[in-house]
Image: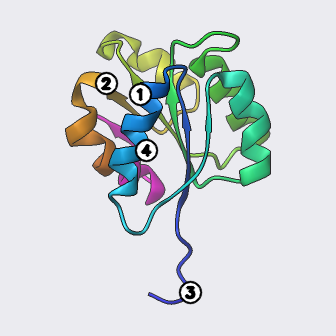
């Protein structure tokens, strides 16, 4: 598919093992590239303008700056940002996730089955709040 850009994705989570797991799932997609990783929201804020990702997979609960605050700040600075929240929290967080500007949310208990379709949905311009 000549001429089509390969989507660049940033992974943001404070746990290295989670970032590695997400990276493993995403690298199984031949047409996606991991553009960078961050361990907290503050690192993500400085990374996003440098690597210009097409999508961001963002944890909620992190030290220094949580994922909801980082999502709001990123969306404010880069309104076209496509952020998928990855969280251990249940659907009760859905309203606050949506109000942050995120385009989707997947619980960590469903990441194996839902991460790829959720990310594809937001890359295609949609949302994914399963």
Q: Which residue is mark 4?
A: 23
Mark before the other along the chain sequence, 2 or 4: 4
Q: Which residue is mark 1?
A: 18
Mark pair 2, 1: CA separation: 9 Å
* Label annotation for residue 108: 2
Q: Nearer the viewer, residue 17 or 55?
A: 17
Q: Nearer the viewer, residue 71 or 63?
A: 63
- Quarter of the image for residue 64 reads top right
Asked which secondary structure carries label 2, the reply is helix
Mark pair 4, 1: CA separation: 8 Å
Q: Residue furthest bottom?
A: 2
Mark before the other along the chain sequence, 3 or 1: 3
Q: How is the image coloured?
A: rainbow
**Which residue shows up at 55% across the image and 23% down it?**
99
Mark before the other along the chain sequence, 4 or 1: 1
Q: Residues within 10 Å of mark 3 (few under 14, many from 20)?
A: few
Q: Residues within 10 Å of mark 1 (few under 14, many from 20)?
A: some
Q: Inspect the magenta stretch and tell me whether residue 70 lies in it.
A: no
Q: Are marks 2 and 1 in contact (CB under 8 Å)?
A: yes
Asked which secondary structure carries label 1, the reply is helix
Q: Which residue is mark 3?
A: 3
Highlighted magenta segment, given as a residue range: 119-130
Query: Which x, y percent locates residue 16?
Result: 49, 26
Query: Which x, y percent locates residue 121?
Result: 37, 52
Nearer the observer: mark 3 or 1; the answer is: 1
27 above or below 100?
below
């Amino acid at each position: 598919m000549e001429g089509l850009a390969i989507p660049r994705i940033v992974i943001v989570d404070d746990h290295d093992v989670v970032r590695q797991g997400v990276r493993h799932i995403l690298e199984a997609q031949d047409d996606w590239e991991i553009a960078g990783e961050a361990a907290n929201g503050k690192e993500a804020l400085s990374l996003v303008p440098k690597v210009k990702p097409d999508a961001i997979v963002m944890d909620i609960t992190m030290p220094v700056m949580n994922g909801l605050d980082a999502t709001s700040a990123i969306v404010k600075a880069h309104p076209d940002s496509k952020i998928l929240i990855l969280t251990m929290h249940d659907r009760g967080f859905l309203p606050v996730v949506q109000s942050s500007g995120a385009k989707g949310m997947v619980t960590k208990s469903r990441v194996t089955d839902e991460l790829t379709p959720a990310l594809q949905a937001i890359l295609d311009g949609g949302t994914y709040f399963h």
